[in-house]
Image: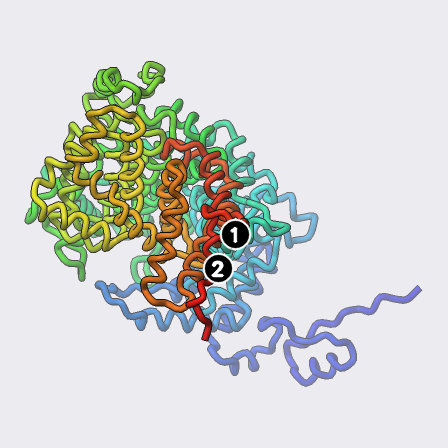
C-alpha cells in the first residue's frame, strides 16, 4: 500500500524556500494570509490586503474574537459607504473612492472570504456542526451580507454576483438566513439582487423546505420576502425578448420551454395561509406619517424627518455595541461613527414592504390561476380593505396650489415625487387585475350603489345583467361610496398631466372590460365620467402617450353598445369644430385610439342588428360618431392605416389590438357578403399610390399578420374568451373569418391570396 504524502504548507518566512517546495510538492501560496509579512507590506493597496488577511484568519477560527471580527467588518462597510450629501447631484464622482475600494477588495480575494464567513456552519469540521448559531454569529453574517450588497452596484458587482451564484449551495443557505430577524432584511436584498442577475427564473421547488420556511416567517419577514416572490412569479423574465410577441410565441413553441412562473405560483398558492396574510399586510392601516393640518404627503414626510432629527440630536451618544446591530436598518451616520438603528431606514423599509406585498398580490392575478385568486381575494374582503386604504392616500388634486411647504431638491413645482408614489401605482394595478374579467367586480361598490345599479339594470332590456342579486354584500365596500366611485372622483380632479391619470383610468376601464354592462356604464355616466374623459381629450393637448391611450380605451368601454352614451357624446361636442378636433386626435394617434374605433364599429353594427327603428334612425341621421364610422371611405382608410403600421416582427402586446380592430371591420363585411369588396378596395388603395409591387407587399404583410394571429390566439384560452366577450362575436366566427382570409384558394375573392396575382402593368425592376 502506498503511503499518503504529507502536505507541507508554504513557508510564511521565506519565499525562496516556498518556491523550492513548490517544485517538489506542487504546493504554493493560495491566499494572501500565507504570504510572509514583509512581502505582504509590498502588495498594492496594503491596507486592503492586511484587512483581507485578518478576515481570512478569523474565518478559519471558530473561537476567534468576535468583537474584533465585527469591528473589522464594520471598517470595510464604512469604506464602501458614501456619507456625503448628494443634494440632487447626478454625477457619480462622489462614489469613486467606494468603487476603488470594492475593486481592490475583490482583486485580493475578499469576496471568496466573505462567502466563506457566510457559509461557516457548513464548512467547519463535523464535530462542530451541531453548534447552533448565536446572535453574535448572525450579526456578523448580517454585516457580511451588507458588505456584499454594497459591492453589487460597483463596477465589480457582476463578478461578485457570479462568484456567489456559481456556488449552488450558497443560495440555498441564504434562504435559511431569512428565518432570523438579524439577517432577513439583508439576506432578502442580496437574494433579490442575485435572482435579478440570472437570465432564468428560480424554480422555488429547488429550495429545500421552502413552504415550511414561508409559513414560519413573521409578518414583517413575510412582507420583506415578497421582494423575492416578486422576482420568482413575475413574467418579465420568462421570455428572452421582452416585447416581440412573435419571438415570444416562437420561444413558447420550442422544446424544453417551461413556464417557471406558473410552477412557482402553484407552489405558493398551495400554502393555505399565504394569501390571507398578504391581504392583511396590504390593507393594514397607519403605514406612513400623517399630521393634522398638513395637506401634502411630502409635508408630512418632511415634518416626520425634522422630528426624528431633533430627537436624535438630543439623544445620549450610543456606544458601538454589536448587540444593537440589525442588518438593513442599523448603520453609521458618518465615517467611523457608532452603528445605530436608523428610523429613516426602518420606516422606509416598512413602506417598501407594503409596496412589494401589493405588487405580489397583483402578480398572482396575472397567471393561469387568476380566476381562483380573484375568488379567494374576494372572500378575504380585499375590496373593502382597499377602499379603506384608499382613504389614507393624499392626491395632488387634494393639495392647494401653494399649500406645500416642501419640494424635492432639483424638482419643479409640478413634480409628483414622494415616498408613496410607488404604493399608489401598485395599488391601482392591483385594482385593475382584481376587476379584469372578474365575477367579483361589483364588490367595489357600496351597498347603496349596488341598489342603484340594480335599478338601472331593471330598465336595461336585452342588456340586463343576470347575476346582480348574487353579489355577497358582506364582502362589499363600506360607507356611502365604494372604491370605484372614490377612484372616479380622484380622476376627475387630478391634473391632466398627472402620471396617476393613466393608472386611474386603467383601473376604471378594467371594471367595465369583458361582457359589456349597460347598468355599469350608466352608473359611471351619472358621475360625469364620460363627459370628463371626452372633454379632457379635446380641451388639452395630451402629450403623454400612456395617458392618451388609457383615456381612449376607457372612452371606448363607456360607449360600447350604449345608445345613451352616444347621445351624451353629442351633447359634449355641440360644434363641428370640437368634433373635428376630437376626430383629428383619433386619427393622429391611431395606435392609442384603435380600441375606441373598434367600439364605434361594434356599436354601429349592434344597433343595426337590433333592428329597432329609433336606434337605427339615430345611427344613420343624428349621431356624429356613428355616421362618421359608418362611411365606407372612413372604414377603408382605417383598415389601410391599421394594417400599414404593424408587421409580424414589430407586434407587441400594445399594438396587437390594431390587428384585432381590422378583423372586426372585416367580420362585419363578411356577414354582409362584402369581404371581397373591402379587400379589392384595399388593393386598389395601394395601387393608387403608384408603388411598384406595393399592393402585393401590402396584402402579403396582411396575410402574414393573420397567420400569426392563428398561432397566437388559438393557443390562449384567456385571449379567446376576452375577444368573444368584448365584441359579442363568437370566437368561432373570428376563426372562420381568419381562415377564409388566409386560404390558399386564389380563385376565392374573399381570400387574400386572390389579390397576389400581378396585373400586366406591374413590373419588377
Mark 1 or mark 2: which comes first in sequence? Answer: 1
Q: Secondary structure at mark 2?
A: loop
Residue at the (15%, 33%) spot, across then down: 568
In the drawing, does residue 411 fall left or right of residue 165? left
In the drawing, does residue 282 fall left or right of residue 457? right
In the drawing, does residue 152 fall left or right of residue 498? right
Display colour scheme: rainbow
Q: Nearer the viewer, residue 504 or 291?
A: 504
Distance from disc 1 to disc 2, alpha carbons, whole Å, reads 8 Å
Examine the image and state in which quarter residue 640 appears: bottom left
Q: Nearer the viewer, residue 631 or 708?
A: 631
Binning the other alpha carbons within 10 Å of mark 2 as few (below 14), some (14 to 19) or many (20 upward) gives: few
Q: Nearer the viewer, residue 404 or 700?
A: 700
Residue at the (43%, 71%) spot, across then down: 101
Q: Nearer the viewer, residue 337 or 306?
A: 306
Examine the image and state in which quarter residue 168 appears: bottom right
**Residue 757 - label:** 2
Amino acid at each position: 500500500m502506498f503511503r499518503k504524502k504529507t502536505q507541507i504548507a508554504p513557508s510564511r518566512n521565506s519565499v525562496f524556500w516556498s518556491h523550492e517546495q513548490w517544485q517538489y510538492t506542487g504546493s504554493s501560496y493560495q491566499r494572501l494570509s500565507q504570504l510572509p509579512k514583509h512581502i505582504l507590506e509590498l502588495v498594492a493597496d496594503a491596507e486592503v490586503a492586511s484587512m483581507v488577511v485578518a478576515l481570512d484568519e478569523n474565518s478559519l477560527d471558530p473561537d476567534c474574537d468576535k468583537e474584533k471580527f465585527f469591528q473589522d467588518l464594520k471598517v470595510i462597510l464604512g469604506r464602501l459607504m458614501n456619507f456625503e450629501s448628494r443634494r440632487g447631484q447626478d454625477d457619480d464622482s462622489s462614489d469613486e473612492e467606494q468603487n476603488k475600494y470594492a475593486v481592490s477588495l475583490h482583486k485580493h480575494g475578499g469576496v471568496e472570504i466573505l462567502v466563506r464567513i457566510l457559509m461557516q456552519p457548513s464548512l467547519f469540521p463535523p464535530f462542530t456542526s451541531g453548534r447552533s448559531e448565536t446572535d453574535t454569529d448572525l450579526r456578523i453574517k448580517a454585516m457580511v451580507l451588507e458588505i456584499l450588497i454594497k459591492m453589487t452596484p460597483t463596477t465589480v458587482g457582476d463578478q461578485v454576483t457570479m462568484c456567489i451564484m456559481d456556488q449552488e449551495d450558497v443560495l440555498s443557505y441564504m434562504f435559511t438566513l431569512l428565518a432570523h430577524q438579524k439577517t432577513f432584511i439583508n439576506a432578502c436584498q442580496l437574494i433579490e439582487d442575485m435572482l435579478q442577475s440570472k437570465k432564468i427564473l428560480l424554480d422555488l421547488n429547488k429550495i429545500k423546505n421552502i413552504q415550511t420556511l414561508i409559513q414560519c416567517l413573521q409578518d414583517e419577514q413575510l412582507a420583506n420576502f415578497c421582494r423575492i416572490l416578486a422576482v420568482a412569479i413575475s413574467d418579465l423574465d420568462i421570455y428572452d425578448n421582452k416585447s416581440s410577441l412573435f419571438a415570444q410565441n416562437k420561444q413558447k413553441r420550442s422544446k424544453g420551454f417551461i413556464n417557471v412562473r406558473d410552477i412557482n405560483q402553484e407552489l405558493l398558492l398551495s400554502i393555505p395561509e399565504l394569501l390571507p396574510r398578504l391581504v392583511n399586510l396590504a390593507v393594514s392601516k397607519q403605514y406612513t406619517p400623517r399630521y393634522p393640518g398638513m395637506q401634502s404627503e411630502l409635508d408630512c414626510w418632511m415634518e416626520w424627518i425634522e422630528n426624528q432629527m431633533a430627537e436624535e440630536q438630543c439623544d445620549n451618544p450610543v456606544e458601538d455595541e454589536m448587540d444593537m446591530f440589525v442588518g438593513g436598518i442599523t448603520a453609521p451616520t458618518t465615517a467611523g461613527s457608532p452603528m445605530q438603528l436608523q428610523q429613516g431606514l426602518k420606516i422606509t423599509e416598512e413602506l417598501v414592504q407594503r409596496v412589494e406585498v401589493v405588487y405580489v398580490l397583483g402578480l398572482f392575478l396575472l397567471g393561469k390561476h387568476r380566476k381562483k385568486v380573484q375568488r379567494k381575494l374576494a372572500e378575504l374582503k380585499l375590496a373593502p380593505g382597499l377602499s379603506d386604504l384608499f382613504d389614507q392616500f393624499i392626491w395632488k388634486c387634494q393639495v392647494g396650489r401653494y399649500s406645500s411647504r416642501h419640494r424635492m431638491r432639483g424638482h419643479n413645482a409640478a413634480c409628483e415625487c414622494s415616498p408613496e408614489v410607488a404604493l399608489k401605482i401598485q395599488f391601482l394595478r392591483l385594482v385593475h387585475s382584481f376587476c379584469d374579467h372578474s365575477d367579483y367586480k361589483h364588490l367595489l361598490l357600496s351597498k347603496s350603489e349596488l341598489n342603484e345599479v340594480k335599478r338601472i339594470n331593471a330598465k336595461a332590456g336585452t342588456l340586463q345583467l343576470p347575476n346582480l342579486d348574487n353579489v355577497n354584500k358582506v364582502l362589499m365596500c363600506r360607507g356611502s361610496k365604494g372604491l370605484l366611485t372614490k377612484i372616479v372622483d380622484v380622476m376627475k380632479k387630478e391634473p391632466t398631466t398627472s402620471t396617476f391619470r393613466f393608472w386611474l383610468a386603467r383601473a376604471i376601464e378594467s371594471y367595465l372590460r369583458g361582457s359589456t354592462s349597460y347598468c355599469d356604464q350608466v352608473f359611471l355616466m351619472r358621475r360625469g365620467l364620460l363627459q370628463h374623459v371626452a372633454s379632457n381629450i379635446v380641451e388639452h393637448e395630451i402629450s403623454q402617450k400612456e395617458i392618451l391611450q388609457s383615456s381612449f380605451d376607457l372612452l371606448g368601454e363607456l360607449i360600447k353598445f350604449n345608445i345613451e352614451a352616444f347621445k351624451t357624446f353629442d351633447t359634449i361636442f355641440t360644434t363641428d369644430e370640437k368634433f373635428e378636433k376630437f376626430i383629428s386626435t383619433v386619427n393622429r394617434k391611431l395606435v392609442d385610439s384603435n380600441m375606441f374605433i373598434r367600439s364605434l364599429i361594434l356599436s354601429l353594427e349592434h344597433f343595426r342588428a337590433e333592428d329597432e327603428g329609433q336606434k337605427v334612425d339615430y345611427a344613420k341621421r343624428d349621431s356624429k360618431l356613428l355616421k362618421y364610422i359608418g362611411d365606407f371611405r372612413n372604414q377603408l382608410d382605417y383598415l389601410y392605416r391599421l394594417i400599414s403600421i404593424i408587421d409580424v416582427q414589430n407586434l407587441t402586446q400594445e399594438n396587437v389590438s390594431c390587428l384585432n380592430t381590422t378583423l372586426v371591420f372585416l367580420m362585419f363585411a363578411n356577414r354582409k357578403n362584402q369581404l371581397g369588396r373591402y379587400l379589392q378596395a384595399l388593393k386598389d388603395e395601394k395601387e393608387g399610390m403608384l408603388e411598384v409591387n406595393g399592393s402585393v407587399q401590402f396584402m402579403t404583410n396582411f396575410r402574414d399578420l393573420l397567420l400569426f394571429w392563428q398561432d397566437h390566439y388559438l393557443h390562449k384560452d384567456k385571449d379567446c374568451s376576452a375577444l368573444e366577450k368584448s365584441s359579442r362575436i363568437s370566437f368561432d366566427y373570428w376563426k372562420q373569418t381568419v381562415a377564409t382570409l388566409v386560404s390558399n384558394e386564389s380563385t376565392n375573392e374573399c381570400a387574400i391570396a386572390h389579390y397576389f396575382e400581378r396585373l400586366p402593368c406591374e413590373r419588377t425592376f
